[in-house]
Amino acid sequence: MKSFFLSSLAVLFTSTFLFAQEQPPQGQQLQPQVTQHKTAENHIKSGFYLKLGGSFPMGEFANPHTNYYKYQGKTDTITFNKAKAGFVFEFGFLIYIGPSFANHHLRAGIDATFLTASYNPTDQQLPANSSSTKKLEYWYYFGGQKFGPVLTINPVDYLMIDLSYKLNATAAWYNSMWGKAYTLNEVSLGLRYKFMLFAFQYNWGKVKFTYNQDDNPTYNVDNSTFRALIGFKF
């Protein structure tokens, strides 16, 4: 995780440099644009983004998940509670590499999410013979980073369509257990107009949970979610 964090810092500094490079000089901003023949402008620019939205469990993550494991020569099971809809926050940068093409309607780059943080609540009803009616509450917490290629389509005006695939490095916490994963997957569709954006993501993969002690067993828990987000690109 340390090397991953250092590499993300390098990407962040590079992103800031590229963002500064794409801003027109002060004098050019004031000059009127006079063109002899109409050609499409390059509206696909690098920049930071912020996203907020909902995280909706899918597949096994949306149902009780039973893990079979061997510990001290015995086979046993543990059941992880089903997750419910939660919240997600993302901060990242669209890094475009090279010029736009197809008459400035297409441009390729890297979608770098420097920070993604989310949670999904869950609960568990107490046994039927319990005298209490209170539920035990648990939470799945996730934090990490995501990087991958992006292709942006600018069909008209300032409308942008972002298509991306990213690999996720994730740290997690659930009911006194730590979790980690380095190769969760995500496909994403983004819609932008000027500074406003909407994004729809599907994430899938498994997180490996364990208690702090090294000799404890590990459990592979599905972490598939559908996410709908709204935000800003600047």
Image (tube, rainbow, N blue to C red):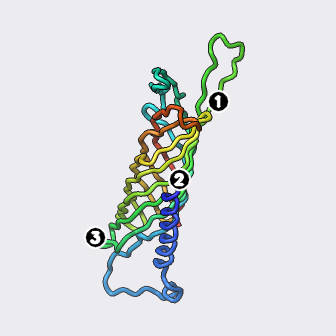
Above or below 2: residue 101 = below
**Residue at the farthest right position:** 131
Point out which mark residue 230 bears: 2
**Element on which disc 2 rests:** strand
Q: Which residue does the image show at 34% across and 74% down from the upper left? A: 99
Please state which of the two labelled residues, at mark 2 or mark 1, is closer to the viewer: 1
Q: Name the residue under label 3.
A: 102
Above or below 176: residue 199 = below
Quadrant position of residue 191? bottom left
Left or right position of 118 against 148: right
Point out which mark residue 137 bears: 1
Q: Distance between the residues labelled 2 and 3?
A: 28 Å
Q: Distance between the residues labelled 2 and 1?
A: 28 Å
Indicate the amino acid at tag 1.
Glu
Of marks 2 and 3, which one's residue comes earlier in the chain?
A: 3
Are circles 2 and 3 on residues that touch, CB within 8 Å? no
On the image, the x and y values in percent for residue 225 come to 46, 40
